[in-house]
Amino acid sequence: MKFTEHRDSNVFMVKRYDPGCVKINDRIVNQSCFLTHKELVENWSCSHIEHLETKHLDELFALKPEVILLGSGERQVFPEPKLFAYCAQHGVGLEVMDNLAACRTYNVLTTEDREVVLALIMQA
């Protein structure tokens, strides 16, 4: 699948997504991760949507996003409602979708210069 191109080569963009594997610029990542247009954090400790906790969201809040795109794996699975409320309390939107949709949406929002964090749960 071809993703939206971004002209700035210093920006982290998703180049390809396959189940269990994402290509971010020239890096292949096989584990849960999160990124912004300027930062990539591999080996995020959340390996399943059922394990998502406020401590995981706090890591993402530190990046000052206006919205978090949470890829819940190969299927869209929603976390506990209290986690949506936690994000709202911090003034951050939380959008949950499958990983492929989250990658596409991230690329679009990044080209619009939005402050977005993409968090992908890659189940082992």
Image (cartoon, rainbow, N blue to C red):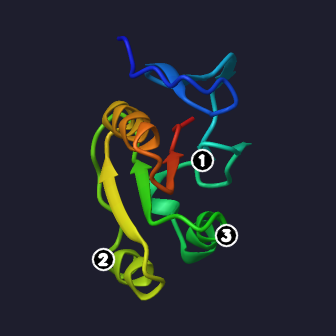
Q: Which residue is mark 2?
A: 81
**Upstream in sequence: badge 3 or badge 1:** 1
Tell which residue pokes out farthest to the top in this image: 1
Residue 62 numbered mark, or none: 3
Which class describes the residues within 10 Å of circle 3: few (<14), some (14-19), or many (20+)?
few
Kindly indicate the quadrant of the structure image that contains residue 11. top right
- Please state, as top left, top right, bottom left or bottom right, where the N terminus lies in the image: top left
Identity of the amino acid at label 1? Thr
Which of the two marks, 2 or 1, is nearer to us in this view? 1
Are the residues flagged by discs 3 and 1 in contact, CB closer than 8 Å? no
* Residue 87 at x, y percent in the picture: 43, 77
Label 2, label 1: how many angstroms apart (C-alpha)?
A: 24 Å
Label 3, label 2: how many angstroms apart (C-alpha)?
A: 21 Å
* Residue 106 at x, y percent in the picture: 42, 40
Which class describes the residues within 10 Å of circle 1: few (<14), some (14-19), or many (20+)?
many
Identity of the amino acid at label 2? Pro
Q: Which residue is mark 1?
A: 36
